[in-house]
Image (spheres, rainbow, N blue to C red):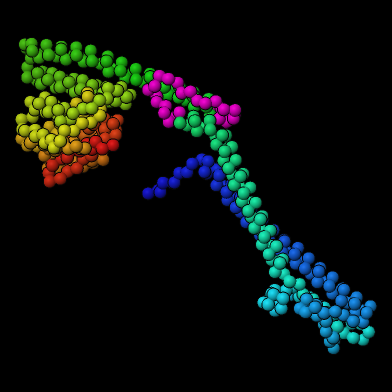
Amino acid sequence: MVKEQRKIKLLRKSSRPFLWISFGLLAISALVLYFYLRFLLRNAVEEELRSTVGRVENSIKTQGSWYELPPIVEVAMVSKLGKEQIKDTLMYDPSQNELEEFRELNTYMGWKGENYRITVRALIVESNEILITVNILYGTITVLVFLFLYYFNNKATQKLWFPFFENLNKMKQFSVSSQDPLLLMDSDILEFTELNTEITTLTEKVQSDYKNLKQFTENVSHELQTPLAIIQAKIDTIINGEGLNNSQFEQLSSIQKDIQRLKQLNKRLGLLSKIENEQFTNVKPCKLNEVLRDRIEHLSELYPAKIILNVQKETIVIMDAHLAEVLCDNLLSNAIKYATPNTPITIDLQKNALTVKNKGTCAILKPELLFNRFYRETDELKSTGLGLAIVKKICDFYGFTPSYSHENGTHNFIVNFEV
């Protein structure tokens, strides 16, 4: 099973690269600044150390003496000259009474047969403090600039995409059954204008096709009724006449049943079309227990066994009254049609659910197809295959949930009214 990809908003998606690139550049620039300032400060310290060495050497050459200021400047006579060294070292500073970090330069000079080692040091704690302070200031200023730019970039992006989101909301509210055209917000962006043009053309075409299809369906349904009624009347006349043998009577009776089935099929297809076209707008509170009692009384003549109604509490659903009758009729007709002969049909009506139960030894083989159009488990009973499809369509229309189960030799058809 393919895992569904998590969806995120467009503005957030478009802002992510900006955030990551900005944080990356901020981190890189902070590191570059740190090491560059460190390099400059070290060069400045070393330049100061060499300047001090130059003063000491000049003092030795001109005056034959030197000055010392431990631990900043130290001069010692040595037996031989060594290599110049520069390094960081920790030393005790009497003025601070603690160990401090120094930058130390050791160099050598020879003068009038004497060898001298000159050691000069510079305190680098202040350099580190300067370095840290500069980086903190840089980071603070950069973060403020980043937040400022992000805020105005986000505002500018929202303004840029505002026509798109406005038109998206209008498209969500668009209905093909509406007579009003889809009026989209204009934009000075060429791509948005082209998108609006294509969407407007498409919706107008869809509305036109929908209107033509609706008209065609209604016309076909209406026009079929008259010839079917005429054929039915003529067959009734022939059957009621004289001179028919048994074979002719059986054939005409079969034709009569097929015509009746065709009329029922035409009626149900018309009903499905009206539901899909959202033509049932007379929505009001319906007392389902009263609807069920009326439909049971109407259908009880077709079923010799008992139809038992168990009502725990008055159930009121918000829907079209005619569709409420159709829903109950189709569930009851299905139970009557497929129930084991001479077994009771039980209807349980609760606050949030309606359950219709009828006896049946075998469970339905493909329950996932049960509410599909024209699906029948068997051809033994001639039916339109639309009864439960209409139940499903009505449930979908109002947000109800139909389901089926088979337990202990009983078929259970359940409609849950919780939305």
Res 374 quadrant in image: top left
Left or right? Give the position of 61 relative to 72: right
x and y percentages locating residue 266 in the rendered image? 24, 21
Q: Say left or right for 138 vs 202.
A: right
Residue name at image x 8 percent, y 28 percent: 300
Residue occupying image coordinates x 14% and y 34%: 335
Residue 287 position in % (x across, y down): 18, 28
Asked whether the viewer can see residue 356, the reply is no
Q: Position of residue 113 (x, y in %)?
A: 92, 86
Q: Quadrant of residue 80?
A: bottom right
- Can residue 336 be seen here? The reply is yes
Vertical side of 189 occupied by 17: above or below = below
Residue at image location 70% in from the left, 62% down from the top: 130
Number of numbered discs: 0
Residue 289 occupies quadrant? top left
Depth check: 335 or 255 in front?
A: 335
Kindly report the secondary structure that dominates the magenta region of the rendered protein.
Answer: loop
Q: Residue 188, percent across and down? A: 59, 28
Pick the quarter of the image with the C terminus.
top left
User: What range of the chain is rendered magenta?
Assistant: 170-194
Identify the residue at image location x=78%, y=76%.
Answer: 72
Q: Nearer the viewer, residue 277 or 374?
A: 277
Q: Is residue 223 left or right of residue 133?
A: left
Q: Is residue 184 magenta?
A: yes
* 74 part of magenta stretch: no
Q: Is residue 209 left or right of residue 332?
A: right
